[in-house]
Amino acid sequence: ASRRASAVAARALDAVAAMLDEQAEELGRIDRIAGDGDHGIGMQRGSRAASAAASRAVAAGAGARTALQHAGDAWADKGGGTSGAIWGEMLLDLGAALGDDDAVDAALLSAGVGRMKDAVMSFGKATVGDKTMIDAIVPFADTLRDRLAQGDDLLDAWATAADAAQAAAEATAQLTARLGRARTHGDRSLGTPDPGAVSFALVTRTVLDVLKE
Ligand code: ADP
Ligand code: MG
Ligand code: MG
């Protein structure tokens, strides 16, 4: 609580960019099976630009809302594709919920994650079961909210939510895509998880490690 929320956000984006450098090849491989193969490179470029933008904003004294706004704009601009637009939107919504005064607690963070979830669902018109990142975002946001309501502290609640996101991402392998590019590839995606759901789950795991620092 002694750390500024904007500084934690910048540190988290830096860790996410480093993680995605390592995972880019595998995410591209998954996207190649039923999509166009650019999910790894898109996430890598987007997160790197977002991390740089957030660091610059924090160095200039920005609060979480402003830092995440710059980061979201940079991710959408440099990441490209559907996932770039969605991640850009998610960071804007998270920032809008956190605000600029940097007094962020678990309840506010969970509300921000819920707002992120709502934004993605109205933005992309996908619902649970369409084999998109929504399949990981919904269990993540709902588990975080529910565990906090049960009295878990933030780190325990986030860890349980990240586990739920990972399990849900893996379970998308059983689904056939109905939206986006994957749709035109029919059930070629059967047996392979949705790349956006996999990367979302990986991001939640990386952010947990930063929250623990
Ligand atoms: P593109 O599909 O434009 O090449 P990416 O490959 O980077 O972009 O991202 C693909 C991911 O975007 C999918 O795996 C899926 O998780 C996500 N996605 C696609 N369409 C939607 C949608 N309508 N709502 C939410 N997520 C979506
Ligand atoms: Mg793609
Ligand atoms: Mg593409």
Image (spheres, rainbow, N blue to C red):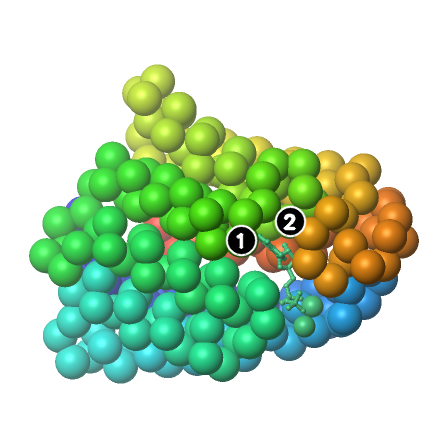
Q: Position of residue 93 (x, y in %)?
A: 32, 55
User: CA gap, disc 1 to disc 2?
Assistant: 10 Å
Identify the amino acid type marked 1: Gly
Q: Position of residue 208 (x, y in %)?
A: 43, 48
Identify the amino acid type marked 2: Thr
Q: In the drawing, does residue 29 fall left or right of residue 66?
A: right
Could one spot residue 83 in this view of the protein?
Answer: yes
Name the quadrant where ligand 2 sits: bottom right
**Which residue occupies the foreground of this view, 69 or 186?**
186
Q: Is residue 195 above or below residue 138?
A: below
Q: Which mark is residue 132?
A: 2
Q: What residue appears at the point 66 percent right and 70 percent down from the top-left corner?
A: 40
Q: What residue appears at the point 40 percent right and 61 percent down from the top-left corner?
A: 89
Task: Give yes or no for contact between labels 1 and 2 (Cβ–Cβ under 8 Å).
Answer: yes
Q: What residue appears at the point 81 percent right and 67 percent down from the top-left corner?
A: 32
Per the image, the residue denoted by label 1 is 124
Q: Which mark is residue 89?
A: none
Tell which residue pokes out farthest to the right in this image. Answer: 188
Q: Is mark 1 within 8 Å of ligand 1?
A: yes
